[in-house]
Amino acid sequence: MEPIIEFKNFTFKYRTQVEPTLFDINLKIFPGEKVLIVGPSGSGKSTLAHCINGLVPFSYSGDISGEYYVGGKDPRKLDIFALSQMVGTVLQDTDGQFIGLTVAEDIAFALENDAVPREELLKKVDDVAKTVFVDEFLDHAPYALSGGQKQRVSMAGVLVDDVDILLFDEPLANLDPATGKKAIALIDEIQKNQGKTIVIIEHRLEDALYKDVDRIIVVGEGRIVADMTPDELLSKDILQQQGIREPLYVTALKHAGCEILPEKKPGHLETMDLSSYKEKVKTWFESVSLPEAALAEEAVLSVKNLNFSYLKDRPVLKDINFEIKRGEMSAIVGKNGAGKSTLSNLICGFLQPNSGEILLNGKDISPLSIKERGEKIGLVMQNPNQMISKPMIFDEVALGLSVRGVPEEEIKERVNETLKICGLYPYRKWPVNALSFGQKKRVTIASILVMNPEILILDEPTAGQDYRHYTEIMEFLKYLNEEKGITILMITHDMHLMLEYTNRAIVIADGELICDNSPAYVLSNEEISDRAYLKKTSLFDLAKCCEISEPQAFVERFIYYDREVRHG
């Protein structure tokens, strides 16, 4: 069989760079295969994707040596339109992909360009919408949909053109865990039913492996480091060496001293042969003891009987009650559209509740303006580009102080001190656009931190970050929490973040607070996980498979032990 995608001794260097981004790539992908590409940020995996869908060389020019073929043709001899008829790309940022004012218009765009007769066009749009379960949203505006719904509309937009290759760039980045599972299942269904060739680029390896893939290609520093089956890859240390998080159950087995072998089928916990590992896992579990947790007593933030709706008779939040203790690091979790961001906007004063109250240090904050609340409660948005308004780093961090009329000498002192805490002091005279996404995130945290807030609210602090940058940001937040005494509240879809870094999870589903307990309890409870569109941790399933009577305790001990091993 001839490959549908092939690279032979392929090297690519962007015009603006000194060194090549991809070195000597040799790769074959065959028709109907499903391939997962993983690698840390900057490894070259996105550039590899750009070569497949034609953005290289048509949008990003550079120097190419070697050969490459898509659908048996040299992309350099085609144009971007011809390639788009072979390769459909679903972007990480789905908003950047929408063209139509309604879902139906958006799906029909490619067909209208091809002058497909109206009756045929309507039937195709209808069929594809049913395939990806968006047929009930055809008259909705794409921007009004949830993250998971938007992604399915993007899928429909490329499927309608009947392309042979589907390329998914970080399909899980903005999705809650359960919707992420549905997305992976849908991709799997499309591959099986329609025989498409699927290429997935994803940081969240364990979630991407929810359904079988034929091969995993690991890219590191511009080279292909590994190209093997999941069972082969998970039995080696390649992922750890490349700074990619392996599935949690694999890490737990390694902590217990188990040797992971390909013949044990480690690619899926459900089908893995654990018979020879059970006793080792039990012995390890019994050997780990947890330190006593210190409990804070004083409430810094109280939410009482909070109700809110954008439209009358359509409540978004219903009777929400919780307290955040001083010095806590807590998570707010739940499915896309559950009301998590609305809750943070109410706390910060961007929205006003219909009823109920929010107390800061026991005092009602309703009389405080947004500006006054901003001095006590800082909000860091998911996308740093939405927060940054000054071209230079120092000026951006100083902005909040200068608009409040703080003397210049004090501004300089406070900004420099904050930049040192955030590890940004060496870059203080740099332009913001010279920074990486992770560094920009730090700038937005610094611009809030300089105000000396008591509470920091972060919306998806690690979205789109590889494991190294994720750890960097989270360790920094942990430092702020433990050393600077800042109370931290995080809105997140990342269940591992919640397990590893927070001591408490506030779970919201359908506008109601359905659970307020430890992360290990939440992710060990099937009913709560299902209702809030979370995903039960594989650690819980591993404990059950190994016949451990306290699976929740197993999860808690793993998190503590794993952290001790990695950070000391």
Image (cartoon, rainbow, N blue to C red):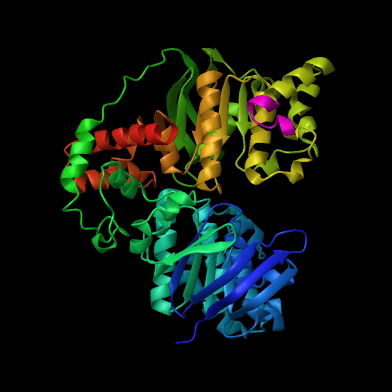
Give the camera-side residue of 127 and 178: 178
Q: Is residue 520 left or right of residue 182?
A: left
Q: Write the start and end of the magenta stretch as one range.
A: 419-426
- Let me know if residue 413 appears in the view: yes
Q: Residue at x 20, y 53 (%)?
A: 274
- Let me know if residue 407 appears in the view: no
Residue 115 position, x and y percent, is: 67, 84
Snapshot quadrant of residue 8: bottom right
The furthest residue to the right: 408
Magenta residue check for 443: no
Q: Is residue 323 left or right of residue 50?
A: left
Q: Is residue 133 left or right of residue 547?
A: right
Give the camera-side residue of 80 and 26: 26
Magenta residue check for 425: yes
Give above or below for 231 relative to 85. Answer: above
Give above or below for 535 relative to 7. Answer: above
Give the camera-side residue of 392 and 518: 392
Snapshot quadrant of residue 236: bottom left
Q: Residue at x 73, y 32 (%)?
A: 426
- Quadrant for the N terminus, please: bottom left
Q: Residue at x 53, y 19 (%)?
A: 483
Residue 538 position, x and y percent, is: 31, 48
- Quadrant for the C terminus, please: top left
